[in-house]
Image: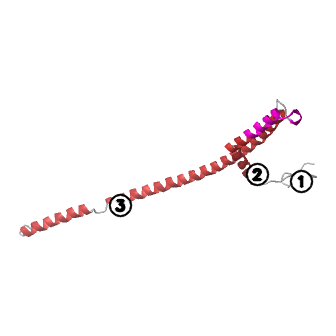
Amino acid sequence: MTTRLDQPREIRRTIVPRPHYDPESFGRLSERIARFLGTARFLVYMTGFIVVWIGWNFLAPHFLRWDPYPFIFLTLILSLQASYAAPLILLAQNRQDDRDRVQYEQDRARNDRTIADTEYITREIAGLRVALSEVVTRDFLRSELQQILRELDAKDQHPTLS
């Protein structure tokens, strides 16, 4: 019997329940781990652990050594650590990329608004300049008044000419 695509599926009962986790919490934990793995403290701890491991397996009596010379068990532990560290680091990088993308989009929107505001102010200033070019300036008014005064003085000196 085929199921219809427009109908929801029936809930299946499982013997073992599916584990549920919060992706955000897991992402924050992975970022903390990745941040710690990238510190000098981690390198010092890891170097100390390896030096103690190798020193113990070289210097301890034979019956107390658990990982003799080729250090197969140490190699296995380091491989296991690397196999968990790599995906956690990638997850942390992906989350950082997402944050960077959001920041980039916000910066771009802010830049677009700034450009639009600048263009608006430029148009307003241009409009004010055009409007001011039609307004009488102080110097022009002064020169016109002086011209009228000269004409009036000239009329007062020669009253018969008019």
Q: Which secondary structure type mostly characterizes the magenta part of the structure?
A: helix
To which quarter of the image does residue 131 belong?
Answer: bottom left
**Label 3 or label 1, whichever comes before in sequence order:** 1
Say if mark 1 contacts mark 2, CB within 8 Å.
no
To which quarter of the image does residue 161 belong?
Answer: bottom left
Q: Is residue 24 visible?
A: yes
- For mark 1, give the secondary structure: loop
Per the image, the residue denoted by label 1 is: 17
Compare residues 113 and 14 and report the one nearer the observer. 14
User: What amino acid type should be assigned to the residue bearing mark 1?
Assistant: Pro
Instruction: Check disc 3: other Cα within 10 Å, few if <14, some if 14-19, many if 20+.
Output: few
Residue range (magenta): 47-64
**Label 1 or label 2, whichever comes before in sequence order:** 1
Q: Is residue 52 magenta?
A: yes
User: What amino acid type should be assigned to the residue bearing mark 3?
Assistant: Ala
Per the image, the residue denoted by label 2 is: 26
Residue occupying image coordinates x 70% and y 46% = 36
Closer to the observer: label 1 or label 2?
2
Per the image, the residue denoted by label 3 is: 131
Instruction: Check disc 2: other Cα within 10 Å, few if <14, some if 14-19, many if 20+.
Output: some
Q: Could you say where residue 81 lies in the image, as x and y percent from the top left?
A: 78, 40
Say if mark 3 contacts mark 1, CB within 8 Å.
no
Q: Could you say where residue 104 lies in the image, as x and y percent from the top left?
A: 60, 49
User: What amino acid type should be assigned to the residue bearing mark 2?
Assistant: Phe
- For mark 3, give the secondary structure: helix
Q: Quadrant of the C terminus?
A: bottom left
Distance between mark 3 and mark 1 Cα atoms: 77 Å
